[in-house]
Every structure is written in C-alpha cells, then in structure tokens.
Amino acid sequence: MSSEFLWAVRAQPTRGPKPALTLDQITDAALAVADSEGLAAVSMQRVAADLGFTKMSLYRYLPGKAELVALMVEKAVGAPPDVDTGDWRHALRDWSHRLLAAYLRHPWVLEATVGPRPLGPNELGWMECALSALTGTGLSGSERLDTIAVLAGHARMIAQQAAASRTSETQLTTAVATVLREHADRFPALAETAAAAAVDGGRDQAFTFGLDRILDGLATLMTTKRVPSPSHGGAPSA
C-alpha cells in the first residue's frame, strides 16, 4: 500500500444518504480486537462482524487490512506529545516515557511497526517532536536520527519484555532469590548483586536507568563536539 491513504483529506459528503459507518468507528472496532486478542485476530471479516456489517461493506471505506492496520497505528500512538523543547534532556526524557506508555497501552503496535511500511502524520509528528528538541545541540543530522532510533529502541525493548513476560522486575528478582537460597555458591556474583539490590531497593527501574545512561552519553558527546580540537586551537605559530 502507499501512504497516500493516511494523508488524504477526507471531506464529509454534503449530499446523499449519510454513510452507515465512519473510518473512526471501523478503526476503533479494530483497536478493540487488537487490544484484547492481539494483532493476528484483526481481519476485515472480524471487524465487520463486530460492527454488525458484512466484510464487503468495509471496502467502501478503505482498501484493505494493510490500510486498516496503518490507521490503527496512527490512532494508537496518537498525536505527538507536547514537550518543552527548550531543554533537550527533559524533552527527550518526557518523549521516551510517553512512547513507552503508548507501547504498553497497545502492545500489538510493536508487531505492527516492524519492517517497511507507510508512515502517517502522527508517527512522523513524533519524530519531528524529538528532532526539534535536538536542534542547536551540535549533533549532526545522522547523530540526531540515530538518537531517536536508540531511544525508540530502548522503549520497544522494555515494552516487548513486559508484553512477553507479563511480570515485573520485582517478580523476577523474587524468583531469582528463591533459586539462590539453594544454589548461591554456584553463582557468587549474582548472589552478591541480588543481596546488594535488596538493600538499596532499586527495583523496576530498567527503563529509567537505561534512558538516563543514554542521555548521559548524549550530553558527553555534545560537550566533546563543543571543545575545539588541540590541532586546530591555540595561537598560530610565528
């Protein structure tokens, strides 16, 4: 499919019978199926049945399932967040947390956004939002694009782990502790680290910890790019 369907301005008809359905109704019905049963359960037949219409009736509104999934992604991720781009670190932190929240609300989006596909205005708006925060930081175009790729990848990884395991880090830590009661001598580094973590109370912080380290690295890179190279600095020789 092309991306034209996602960007077309759809005027409401002023004459004739009112359409029995709207794209919003169709998209919402498909979202409900995906949220409860996963993306694989979404089909034109299933969505039509849930709406009380025939499969063929849906083709009056959109070309097929690929376009339907694209509309679902656009609605699931929503409009780009309104973040304060005056502070790049605060903006990217806020942006990343909001992206993770969108993935956690609709885990099927992870599957629907893999591989070549058309992009709609909401998805591009999210990219625009993050890139705007990096304006004036001294990073090259490639570095700015790589930055949002790394941040989005970090959010996807945490969301994928949550969707796959349906358990929290705290539950995993508890399971590890149970095994270590009998086998701590075989895994001394793990046992020592688990004991230390139990004392400092740092649990369920993998996303925040990783995000802060990414942003720390960006700050270091920006500082490095602002410092003149010794080979180009200083007074000219006599």
Image: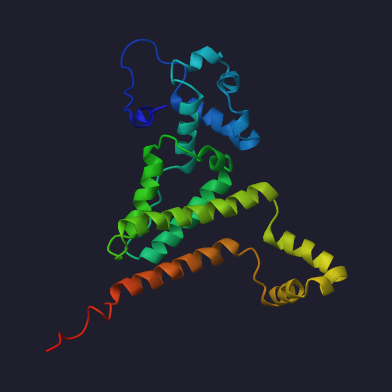
Residue 2: % across, % down: 38, 28
In the drawing, does residue 160 fall left or right of residue 211?
Answer: right
State the quadrant of the N terminus.
Answer: top left
Q: Residue at x 41, y 64 (%)?
A: 90
Residue that extends furthest to the left in the rendered view of this protein: 238
> In front here: 66 or 166?
66
Residue 105: % across, % down: 57, 45
Q: Is residue 144 above or below residue 57?
A: below
In the drawing, does residue 208 fall left or right of residue 8?
Answer: right
- Total marks placed: 0
Q: Is residue 54 above or below residue 41?
A: above
Q: Residue at x 82, y 69 (%)?
A: 180
Picture quadrant of residue 139:
bottom left
Picture quadrant of residue 122:
top left
Residue 94: % across, % down: 45, 59
Q: Residue at x 42, y 60 (%)?
A: 92
Residue that extends furthest to the bottom in the rendered view of this protein: 238
> In front here: 150 or 132?
150
In the drawing, does residue 143 fall left or right of residue 45?
Answer: left
Residue that extends furthest to the top in the rendered view of this protein: 16
Picture quadrant of residue 123:
top left
Q: Is residue 24 above or below residue 232?
A: above
Query: Which color scheme did the rendering employ for the protein?
Result: rainbow
Q: Is residue 45 above or below residue 120?
A: above
Q: Residue at x 58, y 17 (%)?
A: 52
Residue that extends furthest to the right in the rendered view of this protein: 182
State the quadrant of the C terminus.
Answer: bottom left
